[in-house]
Image (cartoon, helix red, strand yellow):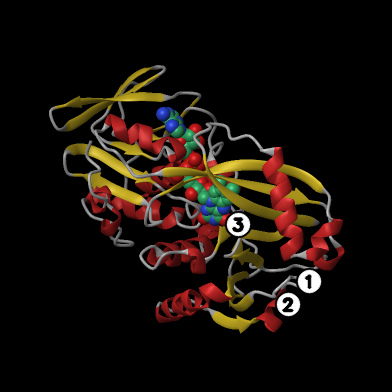
Amino acid sequence: MKRTADVVIIGGGIQGLSLAYHLTTLGVCDVCVLEMNTLGSGSSGRSAAIIGHAFQTEASLPLTIWSFQALMRFEEELGASPEYEPIGCLLLAPRTEADQLRRRHAVLRALGVESHLIDADEVGRLTPGLNVEDIELALHNPNEGNVDPHSIMMAYAQQARQRGVRFLEGVRATGLEITGDQVTGVRTTHGLIATRCVVNAAGFCARQVAAWAGLDLPITNLKRHILVTGPVSAYAQTIPFTYDMAGPWYMRREGPGLLIGMGAAESNEEDPVVDRSFLNQVIDYSIRRAPPLEEAGVKTAWAGLRPVTPDDDPILGPVPHLRGYFNDCGWGGHGIMNAPAAGRALAEWIVEGQPRAVDIRSFEAGRFSSVVS
Ligand SMILES: Cc1cc2nc3c(=O)[nH]c(=O)nc-3n(C[C@H](O)[C@H](O)[C@H](O)COP(=O)(O)OP(=O)(O)OC[C@H]3O[C@@H](n4cnc5c(N)ncnc54)[C@H](O)[C@@H]3O)c2cc1C
């Protein structure tokens, strides 16, 4: 095993893989990605795979806009399809949240993102059979939809590997070597790798990795369950990704059935297990919100962690007290849809000293008080 690298990335999820690929596009190919399990086995392999601008904070929207465009030209650039399906996204707001939805709509429109404010009748036309008693308004964007994160990750990995990036699966980072105020290496379960640049793309373990750099990042891992049902006659046709802010709860078509997601309990499990009693709560809520689901049988279920920050934006970029250390974490429920832009902008920051594709400087860890422990 080569014992040095220009850049070591801790974490082989969609963020680490996008960064590795984008570093190579800037000519930095002596890159080593450490993945304690297998590539994509963390949150990136467990998501609902939705690209939806309306689910973003205003600060993160430029990342999603850039990423959406990158995904539209992904096949041309990387030679593999991201399996994009433009099923549309529908964001439902109960009466209490209607004003918040109007504000989101205005922000989206101001940034040139397609967005339609629709009423409960129109919601019923797009996603039949929903219980819309408490729904006043919804946002609809017919051009958004879902991708296949595995195809995206494998394309990034394949391109990066061809240009010299090394992927060490089954190798866990265990600490940093620091000399003065400079990173000089990463300790791993397979020995030390000398480097002057390390990126924390460790997803649900990012808080632990950041602690090695003397940082106390405000990231909380929230567990979300996904279940997939068999066919439901009312949803035999494609429906938009339907997100109910009240739950929060969502569903979209997956094969002949439906994919349903819900849950936000704090958890730090490395391999999150399905909680059967919680699944029953998801089923009860699903039937209340979408009564046609009563006929559905559960085919499979899984759980994953969303590493969430207090402002729901990611933590990106260098830190002033430790040269050569970069964050790429705290992605919550938005790490798939923002991976292309984040990888590109962070690669520029590392190689050229500043991000150009999207200005991500407002996402530095220093925006939170007392992050240096
Ligand atoms: C149920 C669910 C639904 C979601 N739906 C969506 C969605 O629709 N759209 C969207 O954009 N986002 C969604 N997300 C969020 C998205 O999945 C994450 O934001 C994204 O996957 C984060 O990518 P990542 O690379 O930062 O983390 P991860 O994919 O978790 O990758 C981090 C990797 O680091 C590795 N690692 C950790 N510590 C170490 C170490 N010490 N040494 C070596 N390796 C290490 C882990 O094994 C892991 O593979 C969802 C998340 C969940 C859980």
| Residue nearest the observer in this picture, 296 or 62 | 296
Kind of residue sitting beneath label 3: Val
For numbered disc 3, what is the local secondary structure? loop
231, above or below 121, in the image: above
Specify the label residue 345 is tagged with.
Answer: none
Q: Are marks 1 and 2 in contact (CB under 8 Å)?
A: yes
The answer to which image quadrant residue 311 occupies is bottom left
3 or 2: mark nearer the eye: 2
For numbered disc 1, what is the local secondary structure? loop
Q: Are marks 3 and 1 in contact (CB under 8 Å)?
A: no
Give how far apart the Cα atoms at labels 3 and 2 are: 25 Å
The answer, for residue 318, to whether it is visible in the render is yes
Kind of residue sitting beneath label 1: Gly
| Residue nearest the observer in this picture, 344 or 255 | 255
Picture residue at 46% right of the left edge, 50% below the top: 332
First-in-chain label (3 vs 2): 2
| Residue nearest the observer in this picture, 65 or 270 | 270
Q: Which residue is mark 2?
A: 124
Kind of residue sitting beneath label 2: Gly
**Residue 348 horizontal side relative to residue 238, left or right:** left
Q: Which residue is mark 1?
A: 129
